[in-house]
Amino acid sequence: MSTYADVIVDLSVRSVDRVFAYRVPDHLLDKVFIGCSVKVPFGKGGRLLDAIVVGLSAQPGFEEDRIRDIAKVREEIPGVKSQLIMLADWMHRRYGGTMAQSLRTVMPVKKPVKGLQKVTYILSSRQQAEKFYQEKKDNKRERARVKMIGAMLEEQDQAITRDKAISGLGISASTISSLLRDGLIRQETEQIYRQAVRERLDGWERVVLNADQRRIADAVIASHRSRSEGSRVPVHLIHGVTGSGKTEIYMELMEEVLRSGQQVILLIPEISLTLQTVSRFYARFGDQIAVMHSRLSRGERWDQFERASKGEASIMIGARSALFTPFDHLGMIIIDEEQDGAYRSEVTPRYQAVETALERARLSGASLVLGSATPSLTTYYNALQGRYFLHTLNHRAKEGSVLPPVDIIDMRSEFRIGNLSILSKSLRQAMQECLADGKQMMLFLNRRGFAGFVSCRDCGYVFKCPHCDVSMTSHSGKKLRCHYCGTERILPDLCPSCGSRHIAAFGIGTQKVEQMLRKEFPQARLLRMDRDTTSGKNDMEQIIRSFAAGEADILIGTQMIIKGHDFPKVTLVGVLAADLSMFSGDYLSGERTFQMLTQAAGRAGRGSDPGRVIIQTYQPDNYCIQAAARQDYQAFYEEEIKFRQAMRYPPCAHMLMITAEGADDEQTAQAMQFARKLAAESDRVAVQVLGPSRASITKIRDLYRYVMYLKCPDDRELIRLRMLIEESLKKAGLDKKIYFSYDMDPISLF
Ligand code: ADP
Ligand code: ZN
Ligand code: ZN
C-alpha cells in the first residue's frame, strides 16, 4: 500500500485549496511529514518545483496511474511557512473541520490592494448562499441577486469587491443593498491602521520598573535565555491586579527579544486594540510595530503579514489572528488578558488562542507569556499544577493609586421596602454626589452570556438544572430548560425556597437604563456604549474619546466599557445587576462574573481620587461577588475549582460541544442521533453524553439547530470520537446537507 501526499506548489500561498497529489516513494516514507519541504515534478515538462506537504493519506484522491512521485525531500530546518502548516495540521486535528479551513486560518490569502477605501462583500454563510442559489436560480425576478451570489460562491474566499461586482458583473448598488439587508452578504471596509496611529498620544514617559516588576522581568528573561530546543516551552503567567504594571513588563521583555534579533507577537483583546493602547507601544518601539485586527480587510492583513515576513516589522500587536504572523525568528508570544473570550475563534476551526500559541511557540522555539488580572481557571489550574511559572503582582504600580472600596447592595431588601427601580437608594445617592462634584461615573450592565434565567425577587432563588448545576432558561414563559442536558421543568407559581409569588424572568437592557436615567437625571450628560451604538467602525473610538475628554458625566454600557480603558476622572462605578451574568446557563457563569466585576472595579480610581464601586445583586453572599468585591482571586479560585471538580467541568474534565444545523428539522435531528449513537457506543466508559437537545435558539435563518455535549477527563478521547463522528458522517453522506461543527471546552452556548 502506498502513501500519498497533498502538496501546495505555489509558495506564495495564493490559494491553499489548490493542492496537488503525489505519491511518496518508499525510500522517502520516513522523511515526509506534514509541513516538510519537497521537490515535485510539475507540468508537462516535469520541471522540479518547491512544494510543501499539507496532507498525507492512504488514498490517492486522484487517478492512481497519473500520479507522480515526490522527487526529493529538502533537508532543511523548517521555515516559517512549514511551521505554520504544521500548526494548521495540529489545529485541524485538535479542533476539527477540514485541513483547508485550518490552512486558510493560518495563511491569509493574497489580495492586491488598490485604493484606500476598498469595499468587499463576503457571503454571510456559504450554506445559506447555496440554498438561496438553488431555490432562486430559475426565478427571473431574482436574476441579478442570483448572479452576484453565484459569482461569490465561485470565489475561493467567497468574497467579491464592490468594484468587481459593479463594473465587472454589472450589479446595481440597490441589488447589493438588498442582499446586505437580507443578511446574505456582509460588507468589509478597509481601514489603514498606520494612518490612525500617526496622531500619536504624547506624554508616555518611560518608567523605571519597580522591584516587583524587575524581579518578574528578570525571571522571564533568564528562563527565555536558557530555553533549549526540544525541551518544553517555558510558559509564564503574570497574575497582576489591574494597573500593576504588566504592560511595562511586556515592553521590557520585548526589548530583550528584539535585542537578540528575534521577533515578538503580542495579543491584546480586540476591544482594547484602540489607539490608546497601541500608542504606548509606538512611543517606545516606533515603526518596528505592525498592527492587526479584524477591522482590517484581507488585503491589509496580508500586507501586515508581508511587512512581518520581510523583516520590516519585528513586533506584531493584534487580536487572535496575529498569532499566525509569519515571523522567521519568533522569540516570544505574549498574550495580555489571556482569559478574554475574544481569543476564541467563532468559526471552524474553533481554536483557542492560548493552546494554539503554546503549539506555535513549540514549533518556533519561542517562550510564551500570559498576563491577566483574573486568569482563566484553566490557566491558573495549569500554573498550580506546575506546568506554568507563576508570577504575582499585588499592588498598583502608580504611586498613590489604590484599589477602590466596593459596596455590595442587596436588591432583595430594596424590593421588600418597595423600591422597584433599577437603582438602589445607595447608588442613586452616590450618583447625585458624583454629579454634584463634577466627576464622571460608569454604569455597567454585565450582559455577556446573558441567557434569560428565572429567579425570585424576594429571596434571590434561581432555578437550576438538578443534573448540571447550571441555571435553566425560560421558554415560552411557562417552561424551564437546561442548555446542557435538555432537561425541562414546568415553571411553578411559587418560589420553591420561600413561597413568594414574585418569581419572574430576569432581564434589563442598556437602552432602557438610558431612558430611565434621562428622566431621573435630566441635567446629566449621558453616553451609551453597547453593540447598537458601536456598529460603525469608529463609533467605539469616538465614544471613548468623548468620555475621556469629559464630554459626558455618565457612561452606560455593557462589558465594552470596562475593558482596559483608562478614564482618570471616573470616581464611581455602578454594577446595575451582577446577577445578569451569574446565571447564564453554562459552567462559566461564575468565572465570567468574577472577571467582569473585578475588571469593573478596576475602572474606578485610576486617577488620584480612589473612587468607589457599588455592586447591586440579589445574591449578595455569592462567592463570586464576595471575592470580586475584595479583589481576592485566590478565594474565588478555591470555591470555583471545587464546583468544577464536583461537576466534572473544565479544567477538571473536558467537554466537546457538537452542533448540527440543517434545513430539514427531522433529518437534522436524525443526523444528531446518529452521532450520539457513535459516541454512546464508544468502548471507553469514561465518556458521558449530554443531549442531544434543541439549541437555545432553535432556528436561525431557516436552519434548525441541535446541540450535544460529550464529557470526558481525557481530551484525546474526545478528539478521537470527534474524528470518528466526522468520518462516519462523511461516509453516510450526512455531512452534505447538515452542517456539523465542534467546539472543545466551549465558552459560549449554542
Ligand atoms: P497593567 O498592564 O497591569 O494594567 P500598566 O503597565 O498599564 O498596568 O500600568 C498602569 C499604570 O501605571 C500606567 O499608567 C503605567 O504607566 C504606570 N506604571 C507602570 N509601572 C510603573 C512604574 N514602575 N513606575 C511608575 N509608573 C508605572
Ligand atoms: Zn424566594
Ligand atoms: Zn442539565
Image (cartoon, rainbow, N blue to C red):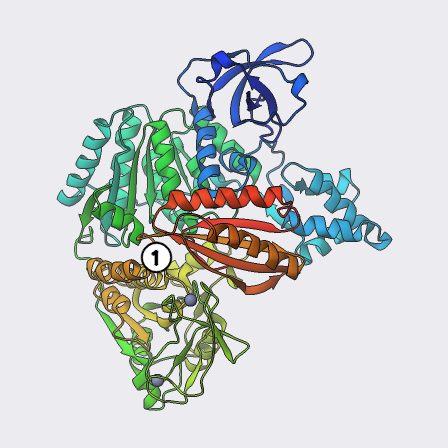
Which residue is found at the position 47% from the left and 33% from the top? 89
Front in this rendered view, residue 260 or 86? 86
Classify 408 as above or below 43. below
Query: Label 1 amino acid?
Result: Tyr
Q: Residue at x 65, y 41 (%)?
A: 158
Q: Residues within 10 Å of mark 1 (few under 14, many from 20)?
A: many
Q: Nearer the viewer, residue 367 or 724?
A: 724
Q: Position of residue 716 (x, y in %)?
A: 39, 42
Label count reads 1
Q: Quadrant of residue 208?
A: top left
* In-image side of 464 versus 665 (left or right): left
Circle 1 residue? 649
In the image, residue 133 lies at what x, y percent? Answer: 75, 49
Q: Horizontal placement of 458 versus 97: left or right?
A: left
Extreme residue toward the left, this view = 211
Q: Residue reaching furthest right?
A: 140
Give the left or right position of residue 428, taking residue 677 as reference.
left
Quadrant (top left/top right/bottom left/bottom right) for the N terminus: top right
Name the quarter showing ligand 2.
Answer: bottom left
Does any atom of ligand 3 lie closer than 8 Å to the CB of label 1?
no
Q: Secondary structure at mark 1?
A: loop
Tell me which residue sits at (63%, 34%) in the image: 114
Q: Is residue 123 visible?
A: no
Residue 597: image x %, image y %?
A: 31, 64
- Quarter of the figure with residue 39: top right
The vertical placement of 126 against 326, above or below, is below
Can residue 24 be seen here? The reply is yes
> Looking at the image, which is closer to me, 663 or 518?
663
For residue 338, above or below residue 410? above
The x, y position of residue 108, in whole percent, is 54, 34
